[in-house]
Image (tube, grey):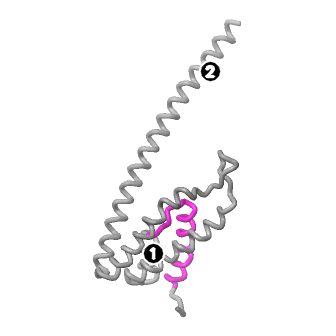
Amino acid sequence: VFPQEGLEIGGLFVFGIIMALCTVAGIGGGGIANSMLIYFFKFETKPAVAISSFSILVCTTFRFFYNFRARHPEKPNMNVLDYGLASIMMPTTLAGSEIGGYVLLIFPSIYIQGFLTLLLAFLTYQTTKKGLQIHRKEVAEIEKQAKVGGEHDEGNINTGLQG
């Protein structure tokens, strides 16, 4: 562990900040964590996946305890955590973890890295596509409100001149 190189010290700060941002955003950050562990700390793919999974566990545990008593903004009698959704997702998440563990044991590191790269590229494409869709919808809504607001302003001006 010691002595640490400059790249590793910088990696600690970058890794911590990126994982905190991923936790706040609610995305986990596994794909990003793998890449950072490989780049900054020179891990092989398989140990990077294991450390990434553990860091996600730690981040989500802290997030759970942080949000444990938080109330839903629109429903004051409800907790912000959706336990119904968690109970539906948990079995598939655990099954995915088990299958992923076996895949990690069976396939060589180069295949794992290729799968992770393809998955990250696909998720980047899907996220960009969804972001552009949301952006177009928001711009159309803003233009619609500006048009409606402009008509009301003109009506007020005309009414004021007539009266």
Task: Please report the residue visible at 52 percent of the width from the left and 91 percent of the height from the top.
Answer: 1
Q: Amino acid at mark 1?
A: Met
The one nearer the camera, 157 or 80, is 80
Quadrant the C terminus occupies: top right
The one nearer the camera, 135 or 99, is 99
Is residue 8 depicted above or below 27 in this figure?
Answer: below
Please give the residue where the numbered disc 2 appears in the rendered image.
Answer: 153
Q: Amino acid at mark 2?
A: Asp
Is 50 displayed left or right of 9 in the figure?
left
Please give the residue where the numbered disc 1 appears in the rendered image.
Answer: 36
- Kindly give the residue lying farthest to the top in the view shown: 162
Dividing the picture into quadrants, the one containing residue 39 is bottom left
Magenta region: which residues? 6-30
- Residue 149 screen position, x and y as percent: 58, 25
Is residue 31 depicted above or below 6 in this figure?
Answer: above
- Residue 46 screen position, x and y as percent: 38, 81
Dividing the picture into quadrants, the one containing residue 123 is bottom left
- At mark 1, the secondary structure is helix
Task: Please report the residue visible at 58 percent of the width from the left and 62 percent of the height from the top.
Answer: 24
